[in-house]
């Protein structure tokens, strides 16, 4: 029976596919987990939306299931912590209730409105240079030209749904919707507000909206949620909402974006410590004490969920999604467990019998912000097997991470050696070893790697409640296994990395011609 030596937290991770709810101790032990799927809504005009009321129904169902699955004798939750998908916009009224479906981070309908906002001509890489310089200097980034953030999404609503726009009390992120639903208070944390690109983040302890930046984007301060400190208590869980979740009224902690909570859940919270997330997408990230941006390779440091600190932010569009696409769409064996596919890949030598995969199924962001590039399997032969294709997919994702890793090291001006790996992809020992070999770095698989988001949210709640400190977190997150580079594979992967980058250089103009005018699919 677990010993009740720590406070337990109900941690909610509202992902794109649905909420995962875990009962987690403030010492980082995941005691029980439940998941409820929520569908994407594909609109006739190419939009991708989600039903916020459906989110809440799924959260309450998953919460009750997690509580029921907890071992007997564990303490009831003493707080609720929330983490969620980011750059998804929901219009809510003064009560925090949704006025329409949420516009997903995958939705590109806001692109023409965002493009107009970042003008006028002349432009550099799509932006008016004066505006771009001001955004970068004050925020660390700039609005997405593809409309994949609140700027394009809010401007889309203002143009196509003016009645809803006028009735909107605040445009909020999914996690903020949940905390408002639970407490009756509509707020957003400093790190969550960053991607409206209307906050001045130069003074990390006092992040606030900047009226000049908001005016540049065409946004209104009165339509945005008030900013509260990262990791602060929003309020107490309303009795009716507590009954729906199956717990007592307890404090609710301000929501943090999934990338921010995962960084904490990986245990990599000291300056310069890095983690690699491998899920549907991938990122390489870590906390740093400075604000810096690499405009050319789409890497920036943004306010983190840890007060007074920045987080290196990168984004690789498809990682685990590449393996799922191979299994479900190309090989046509959706019923085949991933473990079985990876076992076939393990029988193939490094280099995948010569096959090379580029994982750009949905364009790319880091280190090449290229909407038009696409994936390819190259150099196939009669020797190529299903196992070869699977291993090439694993290696291709790792090669792109190496490209991202290269420029991230340049940004932080230090060697990134010891890397904590989290996410579903981290459960594969073969993939972890491939990452170690391709990166030529030590990779540590964190215990319970799929639970990094909820663990991180709970640890942040533990800090807010005074149960633990940021400095104690590295000792609370255990390492399950460590992978070191196999020197025998170094020359091979160096050669493949050169070919990988050369493939993009040789084909980028062809992709631009073939996919001109196309958004992310």
Image: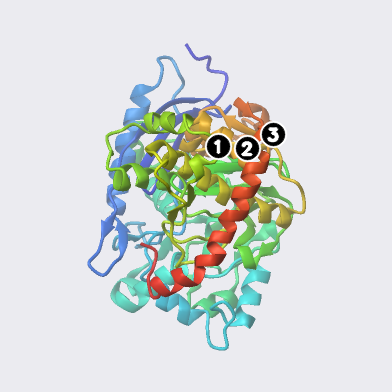
CA distance for labels 1 and 2: 10 Å
The mark nearer the N terminus, 3 or 1, is: 1
The answer to which of 143 and 471 lies nearer the viewer is 143
The answer to which of 475 and 402 lies nearer the viewer is 402
SS for tag 1?
A: loop
Give the residue pinned by disc 3.
487
Tell me if residue 271 can be seen. yes
Tell me if residue 274 can be seen. no
Image-quadrant location for residue 242: top left
Q: Position of residue 163 (x, y in %)?
A: 29, 75
Residue 437 tag number: 2
Answer few, some or many: residues within 10 Å of disc 1's Cα (few below 14, many 20 plus, some between 14 and 19): some
Give the residue pinned by disc 1.
350
The mark nearer the N terminus, 3 or 2, is: 2
Answer few, some or many: residues within 10 Å of disc 2's Cα (few below 14, many 20 plus, some between 14 and 19): many
**Residue lying furthest left:** 44
Q: Measuring 34% from the left and 31% from the top, which residue is drawn there?
A: 337
Quadrant for the C terminus in the image: bottom left
């Amino acid at each position: 029976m677990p010993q009740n030596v720590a406070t337990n937290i109900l941690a909610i991770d509202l992902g794109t596919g649905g909420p995962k709810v875990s009962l987690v101790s403030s010492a980082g032990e995941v005691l029980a987990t439940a998941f409820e799927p929520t569908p994407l809504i594909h609109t006739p005009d190419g939009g991708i939306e989600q039903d916020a009321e459906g989110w809440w129904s799924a959260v309450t169902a998953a919460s009750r299931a997690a509580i029921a699955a907890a071992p007997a004798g564990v303490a009831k939750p003493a707080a609720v912590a929330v983490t969620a998908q980011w750059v998804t916009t929901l219009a809510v009224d003064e009560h925090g209730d949704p006025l329409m479906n949420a516009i997903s981070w995958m939705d590109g309908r806001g692109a023409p409105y965002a493009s107009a906002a970042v003008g006028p001509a002349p432009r550099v890489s799509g932006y008016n240079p004066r505006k771009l310089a001001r955004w970068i200097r004050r925020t660390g980034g700039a609005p997405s030209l593809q409309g994949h953030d609140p700027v394009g999404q809010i401007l889309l609503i203002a143009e196509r749904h003016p009645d809803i726009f006028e009735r909107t009390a605040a445009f909020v992120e999914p996690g903020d919707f949940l905390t408002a639903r639970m407490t009756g208070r509509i707020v957003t944390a400093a790190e969550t507000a960053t991607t409206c690109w209307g906050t001045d983040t130069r003074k990390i302890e006092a992040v606030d909206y900047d009226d000049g930046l908001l005016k540049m984007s065409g946004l209104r301060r009165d339509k945005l949620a008030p900013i509260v400190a990262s990791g602060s208590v929003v309020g107490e869980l309303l009795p009716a909402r507590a009954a729906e979740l199956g717990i007592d009224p307890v404090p609710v902690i301000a929501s943090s974006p999934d990338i921010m909570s995962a960084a904490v859940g990986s245990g990599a919270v000291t300056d310069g410590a890095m983690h690699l997330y491998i899920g549907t997408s991938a990122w390489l990230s870590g906390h740093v004490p400075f604000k810096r941006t690499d405009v050319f390779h789409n890497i920036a440091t943004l306010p983190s969920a840890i007060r007074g600190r920045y987080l290196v932010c990168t984004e690789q569009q498809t990682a685990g999604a590449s393996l799922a696409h191979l299994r479900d769409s190309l090989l046509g064996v959706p019923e085949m467990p991933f473990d079985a596919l990876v076992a076939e890949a393990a029988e193939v030598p490094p280099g995948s019998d010569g096959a090379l995969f580029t994982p750009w199924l949905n364009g790319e962001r880091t280190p090449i912000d290229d909407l038009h590039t696409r994936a390819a399997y190259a150099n196939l032969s009669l020797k190529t097997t299903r196992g070869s294709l699977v291993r090439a997919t694993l290696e291709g994702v790792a090669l792109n991470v190496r490209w991202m890793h290269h420029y991230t090291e340049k940004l932080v001006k230090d060697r990134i050696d010891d890397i904590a790996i989290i996410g579903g992809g981290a459960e594969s020992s073969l993939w972890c070893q491939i990452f170690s070999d391709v990166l030529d770095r030590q990779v540590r698989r964190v215990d319970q790697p799929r639970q990094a988001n909820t663990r991180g949210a709970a640890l942040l709640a533990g800090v807010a409640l005074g149960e633990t400190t940021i400095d104690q977190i590295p000792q609370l997150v255990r390492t399950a296994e460590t992978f070191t580079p196999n020197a025998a594979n170094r020359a091979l992967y160096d050669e493949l990395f050169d070919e990988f980058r050369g493939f993009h250089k040789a084909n980028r103009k062809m992709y631009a011609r073939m996919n001109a005018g196309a958004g992310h699919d």
